[in-house]
Image (tube, rainbow, N blue to C red):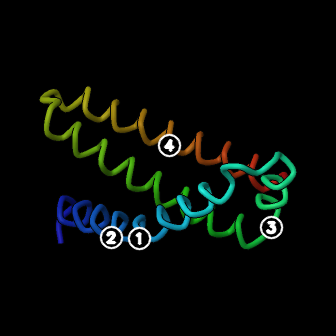
Amino acid sequence: MNLSTKKWLFTKISSAILIPFMIWFLLKFVSLFDSDYQTLIDLVTVKSFKLVFTGFILTAFLFYTLTISEIFEDYINDQKIKNVANKVVFTFAIIILIFTLIILHTL
C-alpha cells in the first residue's frame, strides 16, 4: 500500500471516528448551556470526561493534519514549499495538542 492510499484510509477512518465524538461533545456542550462555572469545572475534572475528550482531541488533530496535508498536495506545486508547509502544520498540531492536554489534565 502506497503513502497516498494510507493517508486516504487514515482520513476516512478518523472522520468516521469523529462522528460519535462530535455527537458526544455537542450533547455535553448543550447540557452546559445554562450551567454555572462550578458545573463546568465538576464535569471537566471527571476522569472519564478527560479520557473521552483526549480521544476526541487526538482524533480531531489527526484528521486536521491529514486534511490540510491533502490540500497542500493539491494546491502547492513546489515540493520544498509543500514539505515546509506540511512540517509547520504538523508541528503546530503537536504543540497545540500537547498544550491542550496539559491544561486539561492539570484541572
Give the number of the disc on residue 17.
1
Q: Quadrant of residue 81?
A: top left
Amino acid found under the numbered disc labelled 4: Ala
Give the residue at mark 4. 93
- Which residue: 83% across, 53% down? 41
Give the residue at mark 3. 46
Callouts 3 and 4 close, C-beta under 8 Å = no
Callouts 2 and 4 close, C-beta under 8 Å = no
Q: Is residue 46 left or right of residue 60?
A: right
| Position of the N terminus by quadrant | bottom left
Q: Is residue 58 left or right of residue 36?
A: left
Q: CA distance from mark 2 to mark 4?
A: 19 Å
Mark 1 surroundings within 10 Å by alpha-carbon count, few (fewer than 14), some (14 through 19), many (20 or more) = some
Q: Is residue 77 left or right of residue 19?
A: left
Mark 2 surroundings within 10 Å by alpha-carbon count, few (fewer than 14), some (14 through 19), many (20 or more) = few
Amino acid found under the numbered disc labelled 3: Val
87 is higher (above) or lower (below) than 51: above
Front residue of this view, candidates 47 and 23: 23
- Circle nearer the viewer, 3 or 4: 3
Mark with earlier residue (3, 4):
3
Helix, strand or loop at disc 2?
helix
- Circle nearer the viewer, 1 or 3: 3
List x then y, in percent, for residue 97: 59, 47
List x then y, in percent, for residue 79: 19, 32
